[in-house]
């Protein structure tokens, strides 16, 4: 069965998008990314320090993986910042993909979805393929789709919390109302069963970082998420049984021994 | 002259009456790959030679780093 993740017309066999941050060292990062089976890795841009090797080691490790790069605009607080950082990313990474993050509140790093709409409009018109990180607000997701986003990435829970899908109802509504949009849960995934949950809701992919990088054994956890994604997606495609209020025996009752009708 | 590069004041020598962005990057020893913004505005690589930098400009030179 051909079941691929569609990102702006580009097809991927893995439904995991993986971050490159927070690993204990570069070797663990590389091996965990490989173990996850992900074909898309996120990264960012920060001020260069020539005296600190300008991040050359990291860049060489990432290049050696040969994966599709998804640069982010993490840490930006304004439309101007995200637009300019996106343009810098496009030139440096030679990609028109941008994971659009625009922080609205520093307490929970909640996206400023109002400004996000403005920035998305500017970047789409400038030729970017925007993957916006947003909240689980249905109307915001609809507006992003109206602007032309083919991929939308609502949060499961705030970045780095690992709390899983806090509002499955809202996420399910978005899935139901945007059946033709590629939907990816970005942020909040903490354990493999969260991934299964996301896929069972019909989400097309998950983007995660901390859940793997901060695990006791990141490479083993990456493998776990690889299998969780496959299990969740297969479960969704297979169609789960309907829930029932009352118990129903699965073993036939007809022919049950030891039961005798009493004749009067 | 001193120029704000990546949030720090850096002494840069102008070899002529005007300092181009490409001269500044060379003196700063910027290492590839990088991208540049002046006063928060992206500057395309093709314009490095044409852009004249002044002491009041704030330069950002960025490189790849891990991210989620």
Image (tube, rainbow, N blue to C red):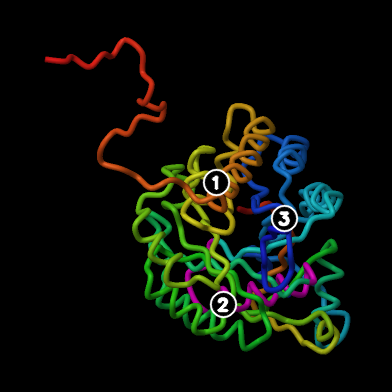
Q: In which quarter of the image is the N terminus of chain B?
A: bottom right
| Residue indicated by mark 2 | A149
Q: Which chain carries label 2?
A: A
Q: Earlier along the polypeptide chain: callout 1 or callout 2?
A: 2
- Residue A256's place in the image compared with B14, above or below, is above
Q: Position of residue B7 (x, y in %)?
A: 62, 64
Would residue B43 be counted in the magenta stretch?
no
- Residue A192's place in the image compared with B15, above or below, is above
| Residue indicated by mark 3 | A1
Q: Mark 3 lies on which chain?
A: A
Tag 2's secondary structure?
Answer: loop
Q: Earlier along the polypeptide chain: callout 2 or callout 3?
A: 3
Tag 1's secondary structure?
Answer: helix
Q: Earlier along the polypeptide chain: callout 3 or callout 1?
A: 3
| Gap between marks 3 and 1 measured at Cα | 14 Å
| Residue indicated by mark 1 | A235
Label number found at residue A142: none
- Work out whether disc 2 and disc 3 sit on a shared chain: yes
Is residue B56 visible from the viewing direction of this image?
Answer: no
- Residue A44's place in the image compared with A36, above or below, is below
> In the displayed structure, does residue B44 sit left or right of residue A147?
right
- Identify the magenta region: A75-94
Q: Where is residue A203 in the image (x, y as percent from the top left)?
A: 52, 58
Q: At 70% from the left edge and 83% from the top edge, which residue is drawn?
A: B54
> In the displayed structure, does residue A10 sit left or right of residue A72?
right
């Amino acid at each position: 069965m051909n079941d691929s993740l569609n990102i702006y017309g580009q097809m991927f066999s893995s439904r995991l998008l993986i971050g490159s941050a927070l690993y204990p060292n570069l070797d663990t990062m590389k091996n965990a990314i490989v173990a996850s089976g992900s074909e898309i890795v996120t990264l960012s841009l920060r001020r260069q320090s020539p005296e600190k090797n300008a991040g050359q080691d990291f860049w060489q490790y990432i290049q050696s993986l040969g994966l599709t790069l998804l640069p982010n605009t993490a840490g930006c607080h304004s439309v101007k910042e995200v637009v300019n950082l996106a343009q810098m990313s496009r030139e440096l990474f030679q990609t028109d993909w941008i994971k659009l993050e625009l922080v609205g509140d520093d307490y929970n790093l909640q996206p400023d979805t109002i400004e996000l709409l403005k920035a998305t409009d500017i970047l789409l018109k400038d030729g970017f393929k925007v993957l916006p990180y947003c909240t689980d607000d249905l109307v915001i997701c609809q507006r992003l789709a109206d602007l032309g986003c083919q991929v939308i990435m609502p949060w499961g829970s705030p970045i780095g919390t690992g709390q899983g899908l806090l509002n499955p109802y809202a996420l399910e509504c978005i899935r139901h109302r945007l059946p033709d949009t590629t939907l990816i849960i970005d942020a909040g995934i903490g354990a493999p069963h969260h991934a299964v949950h996301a896929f069972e809701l019909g989400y097309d992919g998950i983007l995660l970082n901390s859940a793997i990088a901060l695990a006791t054994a990141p490479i083993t956890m990456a493998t776990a998420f690889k299998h969780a994604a496959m299990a969740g997606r297969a479960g969704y495609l297979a169609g789960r049984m309907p829930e029932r209020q009352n118990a129903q025996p699965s073993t036939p009752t007809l022919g049950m021994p030891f039961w005798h009708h009493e004749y009067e | 002259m001193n120029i704000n590069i990546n949030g720090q004041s850096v002494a840069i020598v102008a070899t002529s009456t005007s300092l181009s962005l490409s001269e500044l990057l060379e003196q700063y020893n910027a290492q590839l790959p990088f991208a540049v913004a002046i006063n928060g505005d992206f500057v395309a690589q093709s314009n490095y030679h044409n852009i004249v930098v002044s002491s009041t400009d704030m330069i950002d030179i960025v490189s790849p780093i891990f991210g989620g």
